[in-house]
Amino acid sequence: MPRNNRPKRGKRMAEPQELDLSAVRLGIRREEIKRGVAYKTQTSIGANAEDNKAWVCPHCHLQITKGINHTVAWDSVRGVETRRHFHNACWKAFQGPLL
């Protein structure tokens, strides 16, 4: 006998929930420990930056401009005053303290 793929009577499918893309745009936050120092990090796509805004990566000393994916890191003890913008690969290689 062939298989019937029609839904059974009385069973309703749950309404799909709308995706919240604002969390993706803001980036993923997490805490990482490097050489005994706890850092809070957040990924950034750089699309929300102003047109003339650029940062200098403290690891490779090259510019990070608008639209470049990067990681923002700050010392969780000293706070956001220590916030720095790293290229993703530079953050993985970074082992020193944030100055």
Image: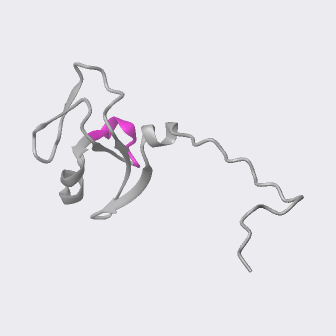
Residue 59, compared with residue 53, is above or below; it is below
Task: Please give the name of the residue rendered at 10% of the width and 46% of the height, measured from the top-left corner.
Answer: 60
Task: Please give the name of the residue rendered at 58% of the width and 43% of the height, measured from the top-left corner.
Answer: 19
Q: Which residue is situated farthest in the bottom direction here?
A: 1
Task: Please give the name of the residue rendered at 40% of the width and 41% of the height, measured from the top-left corner.
Answer: 79
Asked if residue 95 can be seen in this view, the reply is no
Instruction: Give residue 44's position: percent from left, percent from top.
Output: 34, 40
Q: Which residue is situated farthest in the left direction here?
A: 61
Q: What's the image's color scheme?
A: one colour
Residue 70, compared with residue 1, is above or below; it is above
Task: Please give the name of the residue rendered at 76% of the width and 54% of the height, measured from the top-left corner.
Answer: 13
Horizontal arrangement in the rendering, residue 40 relative to residue 8 (left or right): left
**Where are the magenta residues, as a range?**
76-84
Horizontal arrangement in the rendering, residue 69 relative to residue 11 (left or right): left
Report which quarter residue 55 is drawn in: top left
The C terminus is located in which quarter? top left
Instruction: Give residue 26's position: percent from left, percent from top.
Output: 44, 38
Report which quarter residue 1 is drawn in: bottom right
Instruction: Give residue 18's position: percent from left, percent from top.
Output: 62, 41
Asked if residue 89 can be seen in this view, the reply is yes
Residue 83 part of the magenta-drawn span: yes
Front-most of 14 and 66? 14
Front-most of 77 and 54? 54
The count of marks equals 0
Q: Which residue is situated farthest in the front direction here?
A: 1
Residue 35, compared with residue 57, is above or below; it is below
